[in-house]
Amino acid sequence: MEILFGNSMTVAITRVLAAFVGFILLLLGVGMLIFPELLASALFAVSARAVGTSALRSDFGALFLGMGGFCLVGVFSRFRWLLLVPSVFLLLVIVGRVISALVDKFSAWPIEILAAELLFLVVLLLAVLSYSRSSKDRTRPPELGILFSRGFLVPVAIVVVMVAGALNMRPAIGTALFNTFVDNLMARSDIDDLSDGLHIILAGTGSPMPDPARTGVSTVVIAGDHQFVVDSGPGSTLNLEIMKVPLEETDAVLLTHMHSDHIAGLGELLLKAWTTGARTEPLRIMGPQGVQAVVDGFNQAFSLDAGFRHAHHGDAVAPTSGAGGQAETIQDFDEDKGTVVFETADLTVTAFLVDHRPVEPSLAFRFDYRGRSAVISGDTIPTDTMRHHAEGVDLLVHEAMQPKMLSAIKRASTKTGQAVVGHVVTDIQSYHTFPEQAARIANDADVGHLVLYHIIPPLPFSILEPAFLGDSRKIFSGPITVAQDGMLFSLLPDTDDIDKAWLLR
Ligand SMILES: [Zn+2]
Ligand SMILES: [Zn+2]
């Protein structure tokens, strides 16, 4: 033992290996800071949304950087025993991983990762051991023996018993927690706490291309006592419910055009708006030519369900008169003024024509409330009508598609023999707006803040956003946000500020 771990060759080899471990941990830490979601999905096989980008950058970044830092300081200084610090963390990481594999039903045994962590741990412990046994060592910390003392082992044993006990008592703990917090869970809504102003909630910011971070297009606009849902893309109603948007209080749904990614959630939205507040009148659905056919179709498709809901719950939940939607066609467009579709003393909602041919007509909406304003573009190429109607708005929510990324998809589709995908990514380039073009409009119209939504192609990782934006930031010097589901922008009267918050959690 003394010979094996005490000679200088072993000290040198374990030192090099420990340095290698330190560098890898450091790289992981830097990676967590720079592209957290990408690394998390590679390492933990979970979606970034499940963990939270902030937690990934901060907690995991700190863990890896800290472990790597202690490794390298331990290796390159006389204080080799500092390697015990990352060793303890690695041990805890391994314990957590084993518990997860035993407890979390869908978590497979991560053999490769577990093996790497065990290997790292062994390398670090060998490096400490060989150094501390080396005859040249003058800095061997006598405290090492603490690991085997009663003062250390007893607290460790207590923690182990507590963790094992808590794991065993999970049903009782879960029940107690649910009963304790159910009132809060039912009552709490960030929306209730919003002060008077113009609030834009991005409920769905994706496109027809599947994006794990974005559902189909939908935007909620709350202006004082009034509430509108602009478009109802697939999956977006679920987000609205999770964010506790009071659907039953919706004044009207405003449809920009009749593409599936803007209307496919409508059936669910109508049902939930009806039954969450026992509405006695159908929901107003305003949109361009074609809205009548779409609403008739959804009403027809959900008519059986509406009958069943009423038969089961009665008028207290599902009064027959409130089922479904009532279509209203927006027409008679004044090129200069647009068409006012909703007006009170404080609020004006204006529809104006954009260009999404062959989808005709296609609309955008502008909201003006107590001196604050926002435009939601729907789908369009860059248009003069957008420049005109977005003039001076505080917030421009504009669709965006990055053609360079689509070219990469086109190349990949050719390589993998997916001709239809290649066709689609070529075709769609003729009726959307590039990020740089949206930035040009924002610059020309002198808007306060540009939000890019209806993101094409999907951007599951935030590291892709600068590539998506291209030269946009050179063209528009104001703030630009690449939209994600759950973002809230609040424009309060009598200020120029735009407050931001996150509603999906
Ligand atoms: Zn469209
Ligand atoms: Zn679309």
Image (cartoon, rainbow, N blue to C red):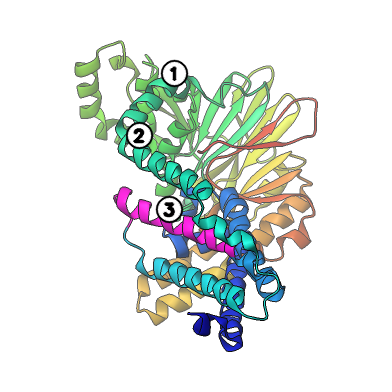
Of the numbered discs 3 and 1, the one sitting upstream in the chain is: 3
**Local crowd size for mark 2, using a 10 Å CA cut-off: few (<14), some (14–19), many (≥20):** some
| Label 1 beta carbon within 8 A of ligand 2 | no
Residue matched to label 1: 183
Residue matched to label 3: 96
**Local crowd size for mark 1, using a 10 Å CA cut-off: few (<14), some (14–19), many (≥20):** few
Residue 355 falls left or right of residue 316: right
- What type is the residue that disc 1 sits on? Asp
Residue 324 position in % (x across, y down): 34, 26
Q: Is residue 483 above or below residue 68?
A: above
Q: What element carries label 2?
A: helix
Q: Is residue 232 magenta?
A: no
Residue 69 position in % (x across, y down): 66, 65
Residue 18 position in % (x across, y down): 58, 75
**Distance between mark 2 and mark 3 Cα atoms:** 40 Å
Q: Tell which of 35 and 388 is nearer to you.
A: 35
Q: What element carries label 1?
A: helix
Q: What segment is highlighted magenta in the picture?
A: 84-107
Image point 51% across, 38% down: which residue?
A: 504
Q: How many marks?
A: 3
- What type is the residue that disc 2 sits on? Glu
Image point 73% across, 39% down: which residue?
A: 393
Where is residue 219, by image quadrant? top right
- What type is the residue that disc 3 sits on? Gly
Residue 319 falls left or right of residue 232: left
Contact check, label 3 and label 1, Cβ < 8 Å? no
Where is residue 434, by image quadrant? bottom right
